[in-house]
Image: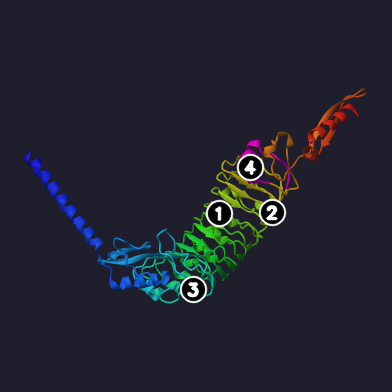
């Protein structure tokens, strides 16, 4: 019994020692100081963005203490607090709001442990007196620490991307999204060999896409969409073997689709829509087995849709080939894409019948084939039309029709006419017994005022020989 009591006392003593050490560590952590040079650099940087009225007077005991600044994060280095994250703009309800007259101050580059910098909706005014440019100098001072750099939704931020960004050797994410920036993409970005995300979408960049991707083998996301880029796709895109997302849509790019695209074995999204690509569907596309979304619409690519073995792309969820000048019959192999949810084939030169096998796709909830030269009778079930609703589009196919006899009026496909019905009647004839008389009731009769009764009277008169 005495041994057990002694054991319990020892456990309690160890717990008290551990608790005391932990509490002491916490007090030490909370009271850790920030160097004056670091604090002065932070305050000046914030004042440049929000105005000189801000002096941090409500912070205790410093910007990383018990009352931190929203959008500023710190970390301990050698017993001192240093700023590691700086987010300026209305990200949170209590974030610091940017002033109308704001500036990049050189003290920003004195934050020597800064890992992430984000400016969101700060430079919004497009008035020339309130516009700003990204400074070109001093970025090399942040080369050892900066991992993420973002400029989002700053329409008043003009000028070019600084070539000195190429000095940020540890940068993993560069996002320059929906700003007012112009000029060409600097080739110096090719020096950022740790980059995983490169987003330059929604600006006014022009010129060719630089051939800089051979050293960016870790890149996962490349988004250059919604600019004014021209020329052809650089062949070094095939070096991006880790790439998951490629989006260069809404530009003025041209030329053939790269055969090197087949090297992107991990790509799940490829969006090339709204460009000027041509030369037909390159065979390399059918080797992109990992693709889940492929959008090539609104390009003059042309060629035969049957060029590819579509069944190879078994992971496709979204396939949009609208307005591409494609010809030929819709391949039945598309009915083997069991994960497909959206299939867009509108505004091409496709011919032949529409295979009813497409209705067997278990996940399909949108099918658009309008504006082609499809012919014959639609042979989908009423259940298919009911499931698809307005997400089935087949209008502007002059020789395409649906069978009126088995179609509910609520499921009639928009813009598709009913097929002509062949009606056979038996007429009494004293010489030949019963003789078949055949009529063709035009589809338009069924849609005319009192159409049903009109057809009935025609048939009755024919039967009575009137």
The percent coordinates of residue 343 (x first, y second) are 61, 48
- Tag nearer the camera, 2 or 1: 2
- Tag nearer the camera, 3 or 1: 3
The residue to which callout 2 is attached is: 348
Based on the picture, tell me whether residue 379 belongs to the magenta stretch. Answer: yes
- Tag nearer the camera, 4 or 2: 4
Q: Residue furthest right?
A: 431
Looking at the rendered structure, the number of numbered marks drawn on it comes to 4
Q: Nearer the viewer, residue 106 or 334?
A: 106
The disc, 3 or 1, on the residue closer to the chain's N-terminal end is 3
Magenta stretch, residue numbers: 374-393
Quadrant assignment for the N terminus = top left
Q: Which mark is residue 389?
A: 4
The residue to which callout 3 is attached is: 132
Q: What residue is rendered at 49% in x and 55% in y?
A: 266
Q: Residues within 10 Å of mark 2 (few under 14, many from 20)?
A: many
The disc, 4 or 1, on the residue closer to the chain's N-terminal end is 1
Q: Nearer the viewer, residue 401 or 55?
A: 55
Mark 3–mark 1 contact, CB under 8 Å? no
Q: Specify whether 147 is left or right of 455.
A: left
């Amino acid at each position: 019994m005495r041994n057990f009591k002694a054991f319990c006392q020892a456990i309690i003593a160890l717990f008290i020692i551990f608790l005391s050490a932990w509490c002491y560590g916490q007090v030490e952590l909370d009271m850790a100081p920030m160097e004056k040079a670091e604090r002065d650099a932070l305050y000046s940087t914030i004042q440049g963005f929000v105005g000189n009225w801000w002096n941090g007077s409500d912070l205790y005991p410093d910007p990383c203490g018990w009352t931190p600044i929203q959008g500023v994060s710190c970390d301990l280095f050698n017993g001192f607090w240093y700023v590691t994250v700086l987010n300026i703009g209305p990200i949170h309800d209590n974030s610091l709001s940017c002033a109308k007259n704001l500036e990049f101050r050189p003290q920003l580059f004195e934050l020597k442990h800064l890992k992430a910098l984000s400016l969101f909706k700060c430079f919004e005014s497009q008035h020339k007196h309130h516009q700003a440019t990204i400074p070109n100098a001093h970025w090399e001072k942040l080369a050892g620490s900066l991992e993420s750099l973002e400029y989002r939704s700053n329409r008043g931020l003009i000028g070019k991307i600084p070539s000195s960004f190429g000095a940020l050797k540890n940068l993993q994410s560069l996002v320059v999204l929906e700003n007012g920036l112009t000029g060409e993409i600097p080739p110096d970005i090719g020096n950022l060999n740790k980059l995983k995300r490169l987003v330059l979408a929604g600006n006014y960049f022009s010129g060719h896409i630089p051939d800089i991707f051979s050293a960016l083998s870790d890149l996962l996301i490349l988004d250059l969409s919604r600019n004014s880029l021209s020329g052809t796709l650089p062949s070094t895109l095939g070096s991006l073997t880790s790439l998951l997302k490629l989006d260069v849509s809404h530009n003025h790019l041209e030329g053939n689709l790269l055969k090197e695209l087949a090297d992107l074995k991990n790509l799940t999204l490829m969006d090339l829509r709204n460009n000027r690509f041509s030369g037909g569907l390159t065979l390399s596309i059918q080797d992109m087995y990992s693709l889940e979304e492929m959008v090539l619409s609104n390009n003059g690519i042309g060629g035969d849709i049957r060029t590819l073995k579509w069944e190879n792309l078994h992971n496709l969820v979204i396939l949009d080939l609208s307005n591409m000048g494609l010809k030929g019959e819709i391949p039945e192999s598309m009915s083997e894409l069991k994960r497909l949810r959206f299939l867009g084939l509108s505004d091409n030169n496709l011919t032949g019948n529409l295979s009813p096998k497409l209705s067997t796709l278990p996940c399909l909830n949108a099918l658009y084939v309008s504006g082609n030269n499809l012919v014959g009778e639609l042979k989908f079930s009423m259940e298919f039309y009911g499931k698809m609703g307005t997400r089935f589009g087949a209008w502007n196919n002059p020789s395409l029709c649906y069978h009126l006899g088995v179609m509910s009026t609520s499921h009639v496909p928009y813009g598709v006419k009913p097929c002509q019905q062949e009606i056979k009647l038996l007429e009494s004839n004293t010489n030949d017994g019963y003789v078949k008389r055949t009529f063709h009731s035009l589809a338009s009769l069924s849609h005319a005022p009192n159409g049903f009764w009109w057809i009935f009277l025609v048939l009755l008169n024919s039967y009575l020989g009137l």
